[in-house]
Amino acid sequence: MLKPSRKILRKEIKKDPLLDYLQKIENGFEENRKTIINVLIIFIAIIITGSLYVNNQSDIELESSSAFGAALVAYSNSDYDNAKFQFESISSNYEGTENEIFSNYYLGKIAYELGKFDEAKFLLNDFLDNTKKATFVCGAIKRLVDISFNENDFLKSLDIIAIANNFDINNASRLELKLLKINTLIKMNDLQGAKTEVEKILNSKNLPSHINQKINEFEGLLSAF
């Protein structure tokens, strides 16, 4: 019989260096999106103003997109209380829309950042179960893997990483998840499996510089065994 997962307190969690590195890259991309988000809100507002003759469902989608854009601005400014309230409102008021699903991702992300890991797991898994698009999938997987690392449930980590196979994610995100798989195999002491995955990536062409840097680090580490 499987033992229930141990509850993790924020003060206990030790962020994996690779995950921390990948999340810093992701956060850098999000910083660059702030200006785009503000422009997007204005654009959406113009669309809503001109949507007098669209059907009711289209109106709901447009309204939810406008609300989602405003919530993203609050999140990007680290106004988590405000962002959480707005994302929760979208989940309640626009059930069944794409933005409701995306709001669950951000609610899970906020819970993760606040150290509420059981809540984060529920929301991020709900997001992965319901989204049809690859948007935010890599971010959800990385945070769930980080939680599983701290629970020492490395088989679960591999299962989470494998979820990406259900989505058409871009090549850069897929490579980051392959790094995460190598890191997991090393934690499991499956060094031969890790070496095999490293060789697969080294055979790829035009690797992004941050991927190439990390794969060289793994290669150096594994060469000692």
Image (tube, rainbow, N blue to C red):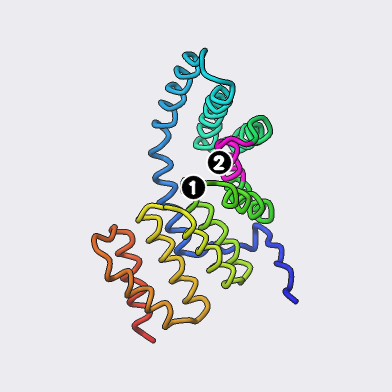
Residue 195 shown left or right of residue 67 in the figure: left
Q: Earlier in the sequence, mark 1 or mark 2?
A: 2
Picture disc at residue 102: 2
Element marked by disc 1: loop
> Is residue 104 a member of the stretch shown in magenta?
yes
Main SS, magenta region, reads: helix
Q: Is residue 194 magenta?
A: no
Q: Position of residue 55 (x, y in %)?
A: 55, 20
Q: Circle 2 — which element?
A: helix
Q: Residue furthest left?
A: 206
Bin the neighbour count of mark 2 within 10 Å (Cα to Cα): few under 14, some 14-19, many 20 and up: many
The numbered dot on residue 136 is 1
Tag on residue 30?
Answer: none
Q: Depth check: 125 or 98 in front?
A: 98
Position of 28 with respect to 136 (left or right) is: left
Q: Nearer the viewer, residue 111 or 122?
A: 122
Alpha carbons under labels 1 and 2: distance apart: 8 Å
Q: What segment is highlighted magenta in the picture?
A: 96-107
- Pointers 1 and 2 in contact (CB under 8 A)? yes
In the picture shown, does residue 145 fall above or below 53? below
Quadrant of the rendered image containing residue 210 = bottom left
Amino acid type at image mark 2: Phe
Residue at the spot 61% in from the left edge and 54% down from the top edge: 125
Amino acid of disc 1: Phe
Q: Residue at x 51, y 30 (%)?
A: 69
Callout 1 crowding tier (Cα within 10 Å): few <14, some 14–19, many ≥20: some
The C terminus, quarter of image: bottom left
Residue 26 is situated, as x and y percent measured from the top left of the image, at: 43, 49
Considering depth in this image, is 112 or 199 the residue closer to the camera?
Answer: 199
Residue found 67% across the figure and 30% down from its top? 93
